[in-house]
Image (cartoon, rainbow, N blue to C red):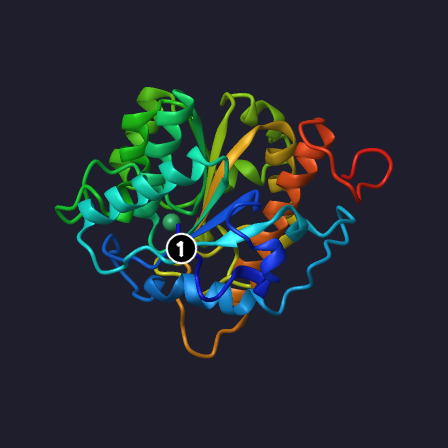
Amino acid sequence: MKRHSRQFLDIDPEFSNFETSAVAIVPVPYEGGISFGKGTVHGPAAIIDASRYLELYDEVIKAEPYRMGIVTIKPLSGRKKAHSIQKEIYQSVRALIGSGKFVVGIGGDHSISIGFVKALIEKHRTISVIQLDAHSDLRYTYEDNPLSHACVMARIREMTPGTLQMGIRSMSVEESTQIEQEGLPVITMHEYRKSNFDLNAALNRVHDPVYLSVDVDVFDWSVIRSTGTPEPGGLLWDEAMVLLENIFMQKNVIGFDIVELAVQPNDINSPFAAAKLIYKMLGFKLASEVNSGRILWPDKPAGNII
Ligand SMILES: [Mn+2]
């Protein structure tokens, strides 16, 4: 598979070689599934640009996660019709997981998650999907488009019943009725902020392995404001770090995506936050692998690294 001419973090070829990298980043500059603000087509390029300014050392886990090898592959085509982009995503992800890569998707609009989940289910037979998002995305179809970003969880739930949705603060009455009648694990932001909210109990509602899909509109605008369908009242940065650390430490995460960053002029903060988010999540993944003894880490300090 071809490497991108611009690599995430601008890492030296030694650590972004296709054969030896543990992680493959898949840029998908596609926005055929959007409904409101445009700009997600430029998300991957903006995130990769911003990533060059990140520190490679993670002061929390006390390691340099890039050393596990992170290759960024050539962006998938952004101009194709919905069904062809889904096929292209599915085929690329299938090839990458076939060669043992941990896959990270960069959107693009939220519909790109469908192809990732399809390929991972084919390999693992059964997986769960944790979605961090302001929207429940459970509509069967939206504006006559079943592959709209507003339907991504409906499409995913046709592939797996194991879903957990968190950060939700926008839904239709039909979606609310469905959640209640089917008893779906949907944690609204209102419930999340209650003092008696039990995160462990919520995470116990889904089984391993887990695919994690992060719509950046789950964040508060002080963290990320450039997104197609913004909603006030999202996660703060430190809050998200605690949540993600818990997810990665308690679950076997087998891949993730970051979607819906809509590039806007005069906002350099949002792409930088999205790039840092990806690198922090890779750090948590590395830490969970080291802690569970699945991999050895040459620079690992004594004891667990988180
Ligand atoms: Mn959303």
Dot 1 amino acid type: Lys
Q: Is residue 264 above or below residue 278?
A: below
Between 204 and 303, the residue placed more toward the observer is 303
Q: Where 31 falls versus 87 (above or below)?
A: below
Image point 57% across, 65% down: which residue? 10
Q: Point out residue 251 in the picture as x, y percentages from the top left corner.
A: 58, 28
Identity of the residue drawn at 43% across and 66% down: 45
Residue 56 in the image, given as x and y percentages of width and height: 69, 59
**Quadrant in the picture for residue 42:** bottom left
Q: Quadrant of residue 79?
A: bottom left
For the point 26% across and 41% down, which residue is it? Answer: 151
Give coordinates of residue 92: x percent, y percent.
Answer: 35, 44
Camera sees residue 99: yes
Residue name at image x 24 percent, y 42 percent: 87
Q: Residue furthest right?
A: 302
Q: Is residue 85 left or right of residue 186?
A: left
118 left or right of 280 in image: left
Q: Quadrant of residue 43?
A: bottom left
**Other residues around mark 1 within 10 Å, as few (<14) / some (14–19) / many (≥20):** few
The image position of residue 204, as x and y in percent, is: 56, 21
- The total of numbered circles placed on residues is 1
* SS assignment at label 1: loop
Q: Is residue 240 visible?
A: no
Seen from the viewer's position, the closer of residues 81 and 25 is 25
Q: Which quadrant is home to the C terminus? A: top right
State yes or no: Cβ of the residue under disc 1 lies below 8 Å from any atom of ligand 1.
no
Check disc 1 and report the residue beneath it.
2
Residue lying furthest left: 144
Q: Nearer the viewer, residue 171 or 293?
A: 293
